[in-house]
Image (spheres, rainbow, N blue to C red):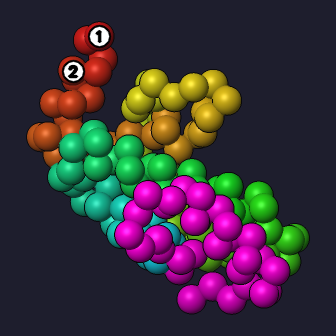
Amino acid sequence: MVTLSAEDTRRAARLIAEAYRRAVRAPDVDRLIAHWRRTAARVERTYDGSVYDYLVDLDRRRLLAAIEAALSEDGRTTLRRTLGPIDERFERATMNGRPVAIVPAADANPWFSRVPANPGPGLRADLDRMRTR
């Protein structure tokens, strides 16, 4: 569990609310971190989802990066301490590749250029189709 100051908790909540404005229930920072931890575990094995599932996973990490940028220095340090080991696992299990999706330059994020080293058949087929376009 990540312990943030009251102000950092409010900053994170504002960003999450904006990202999930159409959702019935938005996650909190701890749920986003838990999801990212599960994503790292999935790519360490065989990522068995589709490219669309993968993009959702990457978008959640993008949101965590936006939250990190909005926090105080203490909050960023706390969040980095938690995310660092998960990010390292993810990076070891992925490789740099062509960006997974066409992402506007202003929204470019390094996570979108990482692809699982061991994609499952569905993701592999999706990536192959994207490369032939």
Find the distance from the CA under tag 1 to the CA under tag 2.
7 Å
Residue type at numbered disc 1: Arg
Residue found at x 54% / y 56% = 19
Q: Is residue 19 magenta?
A: yes
Residue found at x 59% / y 58% = 18
> Which corner quadrant of the image does residue 87 belong to?
bottom right
Find residue 65 and report its horizontal and vertical position in percent.
Answer: 65, 56
> Which corner quadrant of the image does residue 4 belong to?
bottom right
Q: Residues within 10 Å of mark 1 (few under 14, many from 20)?
A: few
Q: Which residues make up the magenta segment? A: 1-30
Camera-nearest residue between 36 and 18: 18
Element type where label 2 sits in the image: helix
Q: For the view shown, which residue lies furthest in the top direction?
A: 133
Find residue 26 and report its horizontal and vertical position in percent.
Answer: 47, 71
Q: Residues within 10 Å of mark 2 (few under 14, many from 20)?
A: few
Task: Evaluate if marks 1 and 2 touch, with contact meaning CB atoms under 8 Å apart.
Answer: yes
The quarter of the image holding the C terminus is: top left
> Which corner quadrant of the image does residue 52 belong to?
top left
> In this figure, what is the number of numbered marks?
2
Residue found at x 64% / y 73% = 13
> Does residue 38 sit above or below 111 in this rendering?
below
Question: Which residue has dot 2 on it?
Answer: 129
The quarter of the image holding the N terminus is: bottom right
Question: Of the numbered discs in the image, which one, if any, rests on residue 133?
Answer: 1
> Does residue 107 sit above or below 104 in this rendering?
below
Q: Is residue 86 magenta?
A: no
